[in-house]
């Protein structure tokens, strides 16, 4: 449940206000109306108080499937919020769209704060008075872009929010990534058992990276829905450009990335490229074969196919799901728990060195240009991912094929089954 909900019609500055309140650019801001579609949550700190705020998609009286989804989502959470910021555009005067939203909000008028945005100078404040006709008592002329009037708005807002423990969005961060329309939003809704993120057959419905707190069997998670990642040549500069950028950022900031594959279409080159993004960043990973209900093949055949195509993610558990039918949802969460456990493994230096000795006895590093590879000692530097620093006579002597073998076998001997392992080679001069 969020403390403050930001609502309004498209392109009145809701996302700009949201970013101003949380003091960073999280919601995508663009001149094109309707950029924000799902709720985006963040944490606000003001006068030693901490509370949550949610940005919402622009509400329209009538619209397409996505617009109707936005409206249903906003209506569902109005009663839950402790305060509502109703944003209008002070430069456009009062519109029929504003009046429609005012009717939706009027049953909650005791907790509505009307923010008349884009009032950048004193001479524009005369435009404020027309909006009093909407019937809300708390009216604030603001400029979300320049910060004008934001302090006064926040001072009034915190009067409706009871003091309590500090709030933050915490838990195992799981990013759902993949091509457009593979079922990321549907799967998150299946986990939550409610329409928390908007689902549509239109590719590209999700634009922001949406963070949703969730608990399962006593563990806290943050589920991150992301925009579908298309081939670079197909992404035009603009809203989708920034959406894809935030999806990649979500991978970097996640603990575990769930790579969704549309089994009805098979694994594509783009799926492999997204998997490569995860692997190169040494992120925990679960491979999710979605839409399994549309495939006529056994579980063993499907898993064998996935392992062959995504061989470089050999550490990642595979879960088969049907987001539409809610199939495999709990298996997915338990797989994430397995990855999280291995992602945080910490071994003593003596255990690491004994494991390396076993790998070398099995297959010694090949010599290069007549020079033999020597390993002096190693230790585990950190977790998330488990990172092993190996001191050697010359890192340049290590062939890539042997390094892949070394990493795979070392994971086995360190009993790290479901997590990537990061190997850092250092020469004696680096000590």
Image (cartoon, rainbow, N blue to C red):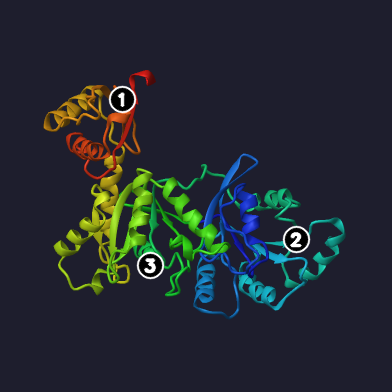
In the rendered image, residue 292, in percent from the top left (x then y), is placed at: 25, 69
Q: Residue at x 27, y 49 (%)?
A: 312
The residue labelled by disc 2 is: 118
Q: Secondary structure at mark 2?
A: loop
User: Can residue 380 be seen at all in this image of the molecule?
Assistant: no
Q: Reply above or below: 362 against 6.
A: above
The residue labelled by disc 1 is: 394
Foreground residue, 152 or 298? Answer: 298
Foreground residue, 62 or 257? Answer: 257
Q: Would you call the spot at circle 2 few (<14 residues within 10 Å), some (14-19), or many (20 or more)?
A: many
The residue labelled by disc 3 is: 186
Indicate left or right for 102 with 416 as reference.
right
User: Can residue 11 be seen at all in this image of the molecule?
Assistant: yes
Residue furthest front in the image: 369
Q: Quadrant of the C terminus?
A: top left
Q: Secondary structure at mark 1?
A: loop
Q: Residue at x 36, y 45 (%)?
A: 280
Q: Choose top left, top right, bottom left or bottom right for residue 356.
A: top left
């Amino acid at each position: 449940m969020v403390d403050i909900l930001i609502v309004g019609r498209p392109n009145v500055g809701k996302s700009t206000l949201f970013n101003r309140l949380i003091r960073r650019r999280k919601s995508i801001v663009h001149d094109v109306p309707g950029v924000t579609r799902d709720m985006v949550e963040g944490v606000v700190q003001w006068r030693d108080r901490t509370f949550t705020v949610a940005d919402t998609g622009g509400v329209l009286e009538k619209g397409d499937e996505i617009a109707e989804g936005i409206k249903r989502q906003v209506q569902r959470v109005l009663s839950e919020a402790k305060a509502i910021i109703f944003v209008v555009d002070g430069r456009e005067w009062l519109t029929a769209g504003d009046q429609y939203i005012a009717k939706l909000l009027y049953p909650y008028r005791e907790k509505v704060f009307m923010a008349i945005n884009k009032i950048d100078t004193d001479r524009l404040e005369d435009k404020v008075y027309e909006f009093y006709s909407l019937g809300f008592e708390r009216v604030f002329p603001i400029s979300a872009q320049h910060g004008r009037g934001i302090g006064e708005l926040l001072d009034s807002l915190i009067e409706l929010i009871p003091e309590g423990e500090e709030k933050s969005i915490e838990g195992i961060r799981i990013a759902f990534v993949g091509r457009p329309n593979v079922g990321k939003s549907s799967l998150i809704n299946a986990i939550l058992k409610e329409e928390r993120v908007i689902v549509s057959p239109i590719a590209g419905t999700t634009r922001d990276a949406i963070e949703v707190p969730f608990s399962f069997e006593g563990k806290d998670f943050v589920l991150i829905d992301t925009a579908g990642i298309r081939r670079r040549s197909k992404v035009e500069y603009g809203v989708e450009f920034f959406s894809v950028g935030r999806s990649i950022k979500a991978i970097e900031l996640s603990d575990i990335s769930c790579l969704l594959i549309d089994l009805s279409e098979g694994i594509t080159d783009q799926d492999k490229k997204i998997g490569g993004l995860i692997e190169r960043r040494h992120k925990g990973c679960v491979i999710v074969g979605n839409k399994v209900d549309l495939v006529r093949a056994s579980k063993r055949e499907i898993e064998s196919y996935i392992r062959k195509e995504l061989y470089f993610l050999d550490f990642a558990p595979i879960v088969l799901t049907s987001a539409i039918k809610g199939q495999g949802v709990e298996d997915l969460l338990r797989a994430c728990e397995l990855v999280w456990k291995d992602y945080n493994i910490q071994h003593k230096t003596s255990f690491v060195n004994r494991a390396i000795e076993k790998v070398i006895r099995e297959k010694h590093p090949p010599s290069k240009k007549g020079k033999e590879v020597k390993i002096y000692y190693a230790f585990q530097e950190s977790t998330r991912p488990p990172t092993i620093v190996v001191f050697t006579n010359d890192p340049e002597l290590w062939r890539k094929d042997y390094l892949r073998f070394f990493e795979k076998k070392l994971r086995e001997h360190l009993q790290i089954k479901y997590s990537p392992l990061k190997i850092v080679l250092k020469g004696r001069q680096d000590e």
